[in-house]
Image (cartoon, rainbow, N blue to C red):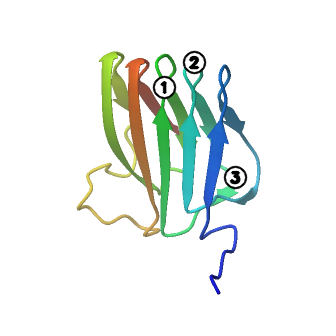
Amino acid sequence: MTNTTSSQRTDWHISLIGGLKRRGPGRMPADTVVLTPIGGADLDLSDARIEEVTSVTKVSIAGGVRLRVPADVTVEVESFSLFGGRTVEPGTPDMPDTPDASGRVVRVRNYSVFGGVAVTRG
């Protein structure tokens, strides 16, 4: 028997056109996967309960990741995009081996032809 609370399971979002938009309070799942030919992921986690390590994986032809996190969360970004950049707003260092005050980490993986990653803090 597997224990699958909301913080331990993987949330899958699969669609032909359209992405994922998430805002507000609540517990962020340990893993979120967005698979779509056209569409991105727009996540505002500034009010969410984030466990120690949370990952967001987005795979698409066109569409990137916009992410807003609390200032004390470490962000690790891994991405491949032919056309698209990567911006991580300064705050707590976003280096993988640098501990932060809260011990919380959000790992972002973005794989697309068109679309980058933009991380803001607030």
Q: Residue furthest bottom?
A: 1
Neighbor class of circle 2 (other Cα within 10 Å; few <14, some 14-19, many 20+) is some
**Tag 1 or tag 3, which sits nearer the N-term?**
3
- State the SS at label 1: loop
At a point 38% along the width and 52% down the height, the residue shown is 92
| 9 to 11, vertically: above or below | below
What type is the residue that disc 1 sits on?
Answer: Ser
Q: Nearer the viewer, mark 3 or mark 1?
A: 1
Taking the image as shown, residue 69 lies to the left or right of residue 95, namely right
Observer-nearest residue: 106 or 92? 106
Taking 120 as reference, is 60 above or below it?
Answer: above
**Comes first in the chain, label 2 or label 3:** 2
Task: Look at the numbered discs 1 and 2 and tell me whether their residues touch, using CB distance below 8 Å.
Answer: yes
Is the residue under label 1 in contact with that under label 3 (CB below 8 Å)? no
Label 2 belongs to which residue?
38
Q: Give the side of residue 112 with respect to residue 23, left or right.
A: left
According to the image, label 3 marks what residue?
Answer: 47
Residue indicated by mark 1: 60
Dot 2 amino acid type = Ile
Residue 105 coordinates in the image, percent (x, y) = 43, 59
- Which residue type does callout 3 highlight? Asp
Q: Image height check: is 4 above or below 71?
A: below
Q: Say whether residue 45 is visible.
A: no
Q: Nearer the viewer, mark 2 or mark 3?
A: 2
What separation in Å lies between label 1 and label 2 (alpha carbons)? 6 Å
**Element assignment for label 2:** loop
The quarter of the picture where the C terminus appears is: top right
Identify which residue is drawn at 37% across, 39% down: 90
Q: Quadrant of residue 8?
A: bottom right
